[in-house]
Image (cartoon, coloured by chain):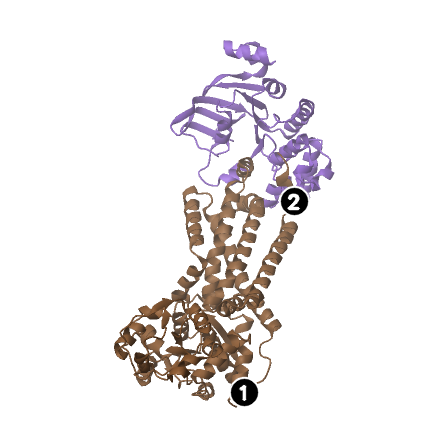
Chain colours: A brown, B purple
Amino acid sequence: MKRLVVTLALFGWLPLNAGEPIVVASKNFTESYLLGEIIAQRLEQAGMEVDRRFGLGGTLICFEALLAGEIDVYVEYSGTLERTILKLGQRTSILELNERLLSRGLSLLSPLGFNNTYAIAVRKEVAEEFSLERISQLTDYRDLRVVVSHEFLEREDGWPGMRRVYGFDWIPEGIEHGLAYQAMADGSIDITDAYSTDGELQRYDLTVLADDKAFFPTYLAMPLIRDDLSPRAQAAIEDLAGTLDDSSMASLNASVVFEGADFASAATNHLRSIGFDVADGRSNTFDDLIRNTQRHLWLTAIALLTATVVGIVLALAVFQVTWISNAVLYVAGLLQTIPSIALLALMIPIFGIGMLPAVVALFLYSLLPIVRNSVTALVTVDPVLRRVGKAMGLTRYDELRYVYVPLAMPAILAGVRTAAVISIGTATLAAFIGAGGLGDPIVTGLALNDTSLILQGAIPAAVLAIATELMFEGIERVLVPRHLKVLEQPR
Amino acid sequence: MDECVRLEDVGKQFDGQWVFRHVSLTLPQRQTTAIVGESGCGKTTLLQLINGVVSVDEGVLSVLNAPIPETGLPAFRRKIGYAVQGAGLFPHMTVQQNVDLMARLEGWPESKIRNRVRRLFELMGLDSALGTRYPYQLSGGQQQRVGLCRAMMLEPPLLLLDEPFSAIDPITREEIYGHFEVLQQQESVSALLVTHDLREAVRLAQFLVFMGSGQILQHGETATVIESPASESIRRLIETQL
């Protein structure tokens, strides 16, 4: 991994990186958050310190982060490892997966128990009426209304494969996955596809048919760790092996999605139910708010400070040569047109996940307003004053120091101010690459469709932006009152 | 030597266009010479040649008995005072800071700076209380007088004036003329005044240079030039303006 020594040095000072906590991560969907929280609480209960990096934006980000040592553990599914990550053939044994992972410094712990794969769900009344228990029975009940999700209809590990293995000779209609449960609930369809740990299975009282011909690939959930994770931590996580079956995972999911439980308390309840004496009250909204805000400010401040220094120096270096300053402005403008989420994603292969790539991305974003304002302000310094400064015998350096910079200062500060506000907004997206900050509750809230959680990130971010505006107004008042007054005077 | 600037057959072009050619001229020391001409006749370019802002394309130019140096232009320019139309004071600095900036950069001791500023303020009739003000708090006439103090701060032997009095109302202008004359004589500075105002030139300068369409039309002592214009156009100019 390429690392910027200077930035790393800066990071050494970050209060949140003190000590050596175990970094537990999750992807950005409900089940992954819950599993991350369960592991985190188990480790804490075993007396270890934990840093949570939940809601990372997808499988590859998690896996890369683990490889890079940015995180220590997250829960992965065997099928995902097999197909998406290692790109192996079907039905690779766990042993074989583990061998492949070991060569990369990773290893799988024992499965947690459940298998989150495709499942065929039937309305309970229908299942009882026809004594349906296995998928192969469906060939005898061709007049049942089977409607499956569009994706399932297309995927090789969905209907087309299932049809061959089970010998179904009909093609069902497609439906939006989210609507399928609704349709099941109101009785307009009888059978649909589902994920075996969906909370909806319990909420809508659906029966899952057994995959008696073992068609569906297995998606066993297993903690994926770095080899160098301490044996004590490994043992603590290993204690969770086999403690979560399909239905308990589904009810945990349901408790969060339908009953409004937060991840932490749902995880606590589960751990207690399997005999771990977990302490209460990990999730304190206020503590979270302080922690997220602190992190958010760090991200923005480091990026902004660097961009301010680099931006102003760059502007001073190029403003006197028109074509170079145009080129710099063009490149900075180009950076600005990259969508922020894409820029953040582009940083991952270079800088991994966490604060560093986020800071670099925010730095690049802040650069344009600062450079542009600075260059514009410098080139528009009154030509009479430039001529006088030169004719008086000011050296190049003194010209910049006594004439250009002070005269351009109001506009330069305005650029920094714009950059600061943009950064605070953009920094919320940094949560997708594990940088934390006020984006954390927003990302989680999006995964859960939980507006109040989203607002827990969005409102403080907005308040920060406003506070920043006011702060800069103050700075401008202190730093450049006379210039501003003077510049408003007609000559 | 009693000349401070000498031009021999000097020419200057911008983008292939000659602003002027074959200009020969000597400026006497400790006198005020005025260059009069319509705008665009190359007066300002002539000033910029003398303080090395632009370079000569042909001919020989010597300033303060030496050619314009290739390097160390800032140090060279510090020997030449410079005042412009509208004064060109730095708006972010106080009057005092505007005037003493160069002296501080030169590392003058505090007492020397104080004495010099006091003397210049006296010569230009400025109240010392103005020192802490900012330029925008001054009248146009005050700004211009501060501009002259600034130009003279380092005791330069040569002072270049680019239409410094033209944006000032007539009554104030007459007052400043008086201060300028005192300043020029007390400081024994050689002054080169560029102006389009013949009345001002006659009022302040001992020597007159008429410039037009890229060349020198007439050059001599003010009284002589006024009495015997070299051409019909100069005669008409004198008649209409004086």
Q: Are marks 2 and 1 in contact (CB under 8 Å)?
A: no
For the point 48% across and 22% down, which residue is it? B41
Q: Are marks 2 and 1 on the same chain?
A: yes
Secondary element under disc 1, as helix, strand or loop, is: helix
Residue A89 sits in which quadrant?
bottom left
Circle 1 chain: A
State the CA–CA distance, disc 2 to disc 1.
66 Å
Kind of element beneath mark 2: helix
Left or right of A166: which side holds A467?
right
Q: Chain of mark 2?
A: A
Tell which residue pokes out farthest to the bottom in this image. Answer: A275
Q: Is residue A471 above or below residue A275?
A: above
Q: Would you call the spot at circle 1 few (<14 residues within 10 Å), some (14-19), or many (20 or more)?
A: few
Q: Of A175 and B198, which appears nearest the observer?
A: A175
The amino acid type of the residue labelled 2 equals Arg
Name the residue at 58% across, 79% down.
A282
Q: Position of residue A36 (x, y in %)?
A: 48, 78
Residue B93 in sight: no
The N terminus of chain A is located in which quarter?
A: bottom left
Q: In the rendered image, which residue does mark 2 sit on?
A: A482
Which percent across, then down, holds residue A315? 48, 49
Rendering coords of residue A252 (x, y %): 49, 80
Q: Which residue is painted at 42% across and 60% down in the image?
A: A342
Q: Looking at the image, can residue B203 be seen?
A: yes
Q: Earlier in the sequence, mark 2 or mark 1?
A: 1
- Camera-nearest residue between A94 and A254: A254
- In the rendered structure, the answer to whether residue A222 lies left or right of residue B91 reads left
- Disc number placed over residue A272 in the picture, else none: 1
Compared with B153, B176 (above or below) is above
Give how far across and how far down residue A400 sits, in percent.
53, 46
* Amino acid on which disc 1 is placed: Arg
* Image mark for residue B17: none
